[in-house]
Image (cartoon, grey):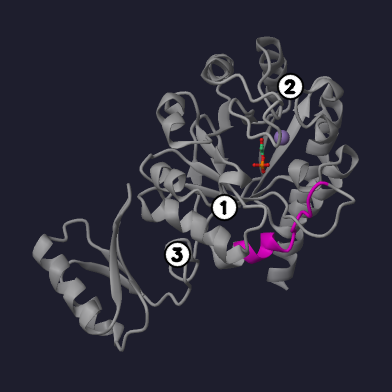
Amino acid sequence: MLIQLTEDCTHEELEKITALAEKAGFKTSKVDTHNASYIICSGKGEFDPRRIGTLKGVKDVHMVEDENKLVSRLWRVNDTELDLGDGAVISRDNLTVAMGPCSIESEEQVQKTVDFLLKNQVKIMRGGIFKPRSSPYSFRGMGIGGLEIFARHCREKGIKIVSEVMQVSQIEPMYDLVDIFQVGTRNAQNFNLLDALGKTDKPVLLKRGMSSTINEFLASAEYIFSSGNERIILCERGIRTFEKAYRNTLDLNAIPLLKEKSHLPVFCDPSHGVGVRRFVEPMALASVMAGADGLLMEIGEVPEKATSDAQQTLSFEEARQALFKMNKTFELKKELSFKFLSE
Ligand code: PEP
Ligand code: MN
């Protein structure tokens, strides 16, 4: 059960509501986000929700059987929309695309990427400045200096920035320079980091852990929400399986399932998902058809020369063609679902 409190709910009213829920056998947790306050009732209680619904201080009561209640669609039936400003709105009505290099490497690279994005109406640029690398001897990112260059060029042109944060201490220096904090697959269950991001008011793009089940993935999102931040994007990026023919197994099944189970926007990252340049576009198109609200893709002027993830980076020309096809696919998907619904 999930109880939404009124804005003016007093301490006494809160105590009454909590006492009643606990008496009925529930374990209660109070959650305050930037938008609202809730009481999460977990466990099994014997209860007629109408008894609590009439109490002062209660706005609404929802019977949410799901384990991860705040991110569940069982109480919030409409999709969560995120307005990033400058016309960048993440919503089911339009396909959001974030493109850029795996790693920020130089000012020239940022400048050229921004030019490409502007020319092609892409509103969000991706780029890592703290890089989680499998080998400690690989390039590990330019750090905050790189993010300053990244931000200088993007801010000027109204392009939004998504970049990975790897640890709690990086949140503060990154805060003013990013529009979306990215949590990478390796940190998807770093609960301290998720809690800390829950205390900020910036959107968080949460990658699926490479071995996370759907429930574990949603639980990670629940951590962020229950710490106070409702602005979350789920991102499928492939999971580890026995298959070695490509980098990861992009779990397209996850997309419609997450859309059904959660009200949060769902993105797909076909670049890391398949990890092979020539398969990135087809997997992007498939993910649009599967219902993704947005895509995260690695691109570069000379992909072969990228310091990290060269093998999955699209050239600007490949990215331009992929964008054209992704937008067409999105329109087709909308048309098909509209026709289906009106029949
Ligand atoms: C990335 O997007 O730069 C990245 C490292 O992705 P992942 O965490 O999904 O491997
Ligand atoms: Mn990468």
Crowd around label 2: few <14 · some 14–19 · many ≥20 (10 Å): many
The relative height of residue 20 versus residue 99 in the rendered view (above or below) is: below
Alpha carbon distance from label 1 to label 3 = 13 Å
Query: Label 3 amino acid?
Result: Arg
- First in sequence: mark 1 vs mark 3: 3
- Tags 3 and 2 touching, CB below 8 Å: no
Query: Percent from the top left, x then y, of residue 179?
Result: 50, 32
Task: State the CA–CA distance, disc 3 to disc 2.
Answer: 37 Å
Q: Which residue is mark 1?
A: 265
Residue under the image location 58 percent in, 15 percent down: 153
**Quadrant for the C terminus in the image:** bottom right
Please give the residue where the numbered disc 3 appears in the rendered image: 76
Coordinates of residue 63 in the picture (x, y in percent): 39, 77
Q: Residue at x 88, y 44 (%)?
A: 279
Above or below, 299 against 206 in this view is above
Q: Is residue 168 visible?
A: yes
**Amino acid beneath label 2:** Phe
Q: Residues within 10 Å of mark 3 (few under 14, many from 20)?
A: some
Residue on which the image places disc 2: 116
Residue plotted at (30% across, 54% down): 36
Q: Secondary structure at mark 3?
A: loop
Amino acid type, callout 1: Pro
Badges 1 and 3: C-beta atoms under 8 Å apart?
no
How would you rate the neighbour count of disc 1 (Cα within 10 Å): few for under 14, some for 14-19, many for 20 or more?
A: many
